[in-house]
Image (tube, rainbow, N blue to C red):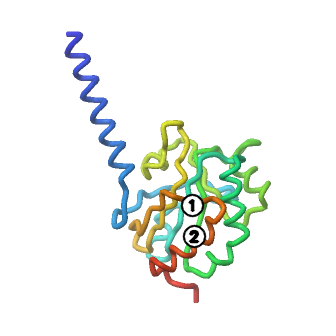
């Protein structure tokens, strides 16, 4: 009986590992997982609301108020004009709570950001995108999602200090429309 229990646990473990690997393997052409997340600006953002209307960029980062994440968010604000040339909604996102002194609302306010940071404290969306790492934080990956709701590109080599200019260059390369 003990052997059977161990065997069942092992099979369940492999099955779960397989499900995690599938989520982590999202690639260009795959439908983006829908999300409904609260932003640091108090609004709730639903990916489905952008479908057929606008491309979306979601730049996941590990933790609010840390060095790399601060650099990335600051660059997105400082060079946001490069992103605003495109017909795109862009966000940063983490598994941090919205509220609290270490939450994304406080983080966005401390940097005087002009875009929303999405919060996924349940980590469900991070899991669906495959960005949740072994530390329980999001990996620093940026997802480019087309107007059709499909992933255009996944950047797993994000450089925080040049995030905005890198995103703008990738949007141009991907043929995302300019604003009219």
x%, y% of residue 141? 51, 56
Label 2 packing within 10 angstroms: few (<14), some (14-19), many (20+): some
In this rendered view, identify the residue nearer to me: 170 or 95.
170
Helix, strand or loop under label 1: strand
For this orientation, the residue located farthest to the bottom is: 180
In this rendered view, identify the residue nearer to me: 25 or 116.
25
- In the displayed structure, 145 sits above or below 8; it is below
Asked if marks 1 and 2 touch (Cβ < 8 Å), the reply is: no
For this orientation, the residue located farthest to the top is: 1
- Image position of 32 (left or right of 84): left
- Image position of 74 (left or right of 4): right
Identify the residue position indicated by label 2 in the image: 166
x%, y% of residue 143? 48, 62
Could you tell which of marks 1 and 2 lies nearer the N-terminus? 1
x%, y% of residue 15? 27, 36
- In the displayed structure, 105 sits above or below 1; it is below
**Distance of label 1 from label 2 (alpha carbons):** 24 Å
- Image position of 65 (left or right of 92): right
Helix, strand or loop under label 2: helix
Q: Which quadrant is home to the C terminus?
A: bottom right
Identify the residue position indicated by label 1 in the image: 45
- Image position of 51 (left or right of 60): left
Q: Which quadrant is home to the N terminus?
A: top left
């Amino acid at each position: 009986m003990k052997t059977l229990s161990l065997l069942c646990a092992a099979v369940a473990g492999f099955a779960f590992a397989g499900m995690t690997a599938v989520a982590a393997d999202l690639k260009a052409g795959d439908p983006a997982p829908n999300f409904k997340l609260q932003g640091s600006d108090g609004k709730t953002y639903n990916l489905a609301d952008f479908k057929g209307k606008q491309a979306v960029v979601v730049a996941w980062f590990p933790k609010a108020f840390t060095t790399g994440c601060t650099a990335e968010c600051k660059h997105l604000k400082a060079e946001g004009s490069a992103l605003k040339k495109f017909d795109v909604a862009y966000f940063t996102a983490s598994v941090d709570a919205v509220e609290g002194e270490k939450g994304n609302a406080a983080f966005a306010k401390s940097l005087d950001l002009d875009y929303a940071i999405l919060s996924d404290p349940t980590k469900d969306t991070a899991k669906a995108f495959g960005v949740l790492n072994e530390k329980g934080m999001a990996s620093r990956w940026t997802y480019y999602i087309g107007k059709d709701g499909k992933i255009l590109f996944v950047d797993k080599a994000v450089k925080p200090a040049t995030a905005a200019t890198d995103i703008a260059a990738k949007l141009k390369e991907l043929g995302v429309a300019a604003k009219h």
